[in-house]
Image: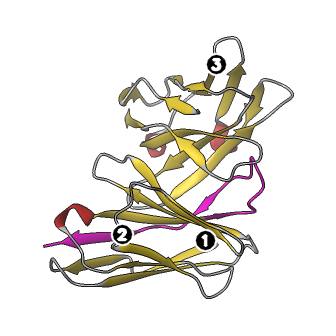
Amino acid sequence: AQSVTQPDARVTVSEGASLQLRCKYSSSVTPYLFWYVQYPRQGLQLLLKYYSGDPVVQGVNGFEAEFSKSNSSFHLRKASVHWSDSAVYFCAVSITGYQNFYFGKGTSLTVIP
Amino acid sequence: ETAVFQTPNYHVTQVGNEVSFNCKQTLGHDTMYWYKQDSKKLLKIMFSYNNKQLIVNETVPRRFSPQSSDKAHLNLRIKSVEPEDSAVYLCASSSGTGGAEQYFGPGTRLTVL
């Protein structure tokens, strides 16, 4: 069975600071890994996706994520956050041959100006 | 650019009424989904559907049913709403292959009085 854990329900950072949002997954096979963002009163938007290759994958708006097979992790990072990055961030996994996603519970990010 | 459209944006209704939400995607995808997002932002998949197979989350009450006229449309009907049905309902689509990212609509917020 697959599962996703986002251990931090809420994160608060100051504008201009660096950011790391944590994601750990459990899967019997190498999964596809995703980060999505949900701004207030909107649907989810894809930030980035990873399956293989360079463990550091670049996404939109300066976000990147690093895959670690040994740690079963896929943490999201940003070097310098902006107040507009305030949103809920979801980590998700998908398995080859299946259509469903397994979402984490989300991390609510607040950026203080 | 929105490619998954949902109507209405909001809906307020009384307990016991029937409601129907619409979803249309213009991405040419062959698989569509309905998710329920509760007040804590938790995402729960309700249905996934392509032209060959409907997969129902076994925890979804029978008063919920998906309705599809073609692969670009997947509506959600709730036969007799209950207070616990108050939530945001998100529609998504994907190409259906394992690992394909899902694209989300903006959601329909349902309030049951």
Q: Position of residue B81 (x, y in %)?
A: 24, 74
Q: Amino acid at mark 3?
A: Ser
The subunit carrying tag 3 is: A
Q: CA distance from mark 1 to mark 2?
A: 31 Å
Please give the label number shown on residue B62: 2
- Secondary structure found at label 2: loop
Q: Residue at x 30, y 45 (%)?
A: B40
In x, y percent, where is residue A39? 45, 53
Q: Which residue is mark 1?
A: B2
Relative vertical location of residue B33 with respect to residue A98 in this rendering, above or below: below
The image shows residue A101, relative to residue B28, as above or below, that is above
Q: Is residue B86 magenta?
A: no
Using a 10 Å C-alpha cutoff, classify the residue at mark 1 as few (fewer than 14 neighbours), some (14 to 19) or many (20 or more): few
Q: Nearer the viewer, residue B7 or B112?
A: B112
Question: Is B91 located above or below residue A48 in the figure?
Answer: below
Query: Element at badge 3?
Result: loop
Q: Are marks 2 and 3 in contact (CB under 8 Å)?
A: no
Q: Which residues are magenta?
A: B93-113
Q: Quadrant of the N terminus of chain A?
A: top right
Frontmost residue, B33 versus B7: B33
**Residue denoted by label 3:** A72
Chain letter of mark 2 equals B
